[in-house]
Image: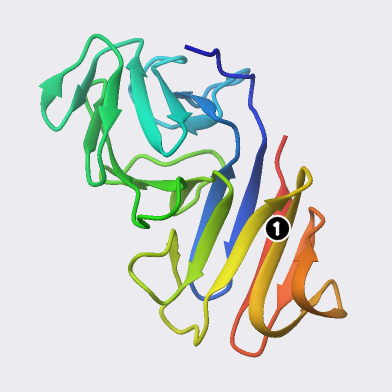
Amino acid sequence: MSQPAAWGDRFLLWIDGVGGYLVCRDDVLMIGQAVPGSRAAVPLVGDLSRQHAVLERLGDRYLLRPLETTRVDSRPVNSPVPLCDGAVLDLGRTVRLRFRQPHALSASARLEFLSPHQTVPRVDAVVLMAEACLLGNSSNNHVVCRDWKHDLVLFRKNGDLACRAAAPFEVNGIECSGATRLPIPSRVVGTDFSFSLEALS
């Protein structure tokens, strides 16, 4: 298996009226305790190791590689295990997450918090972004935005981040339509939505 890069390719997605999300774009991610000097891409405040488990995306599926005490769907795991949509991950004694891969045609996934533990900075969920991340009112989207009329797609384009929406929108005050590159940081505003992207080292 590949080794996770320190911190990795991450950014923060703040969606007005919906919540905040840590978006991780690397294929291999370390999950660990949020302590000074932590190199975890998903740093959690909780009773777990600094390097507790590794998540790896292989095509359209995910493997969890435990480094410390880990259970998947209440079963102890000591070797890499594939994750299915809805799998519950117990890390250490108290940290509990749910793995979701809601869209059948997308390799992107989401980690939800089932225990009170949070990341640093605090967000509502972690998005594991493959080629695209779907935002909108459908329960199959990676980020569910219940009051939006149309879906919006964040996607990779020549190494950059871009977005596509059905209606015109503004990026940092400039009107755009169709597929548009998104710098980080940026502010995106449409007729029924608005969100910000923030860099995270």
Q: Position of residue 108 (x, y in %)?
A: 47, 47
Instruction: Name the quadrant of the C terminus.
Output: top right
- Total number of numbered discs in the rendering: 1
Q: Position of residue 27 (x, y in %)?
A: 54, 30
Given the current orientation, which residue lies at the most extreme right position? 174
- Residue at 51%, 63% (x, y): give it: 134
Question: For the residue carrying disc 1, how many other residues have a C-alpha within 10 Å: few (<14), some (14-19), or many (20+)?
Answer: many
Residue that label 1 marks: 197
Quarter of image, res 186: bottom right
Q: Nearer the viewer, residue 102 or 195?
A: 102
Left or right of 84: which side holds 185?
A: right
- Residue at 58%, 73% (x, y): give it: 16
Q: Position of residue 199 (x, y in %)?
A: 74, 46
- 148 is higher (above) or lower (below) than 188: below
Q: Nearer the viewer, residue 16 or 37?
A: 16
Q: Position of residue 102 (x, y in %)?
A: 34, 56
Identity of the amino acid at label 1?
Leu
- Residue at 23%, 46% (x, y): give it: 86
- 12 is higher (above) or lower (below) than 28: below
- Residue at 54%, 23% (x, y): give it: 40
Q: Nearer the viewer, residue 167 or 50?
A: 167
Q: Nearer the viewer, residue 48 or 81?
A: 81
- 170 is higher (above) or lower (below) than 133: below
SS at badge 1: strand
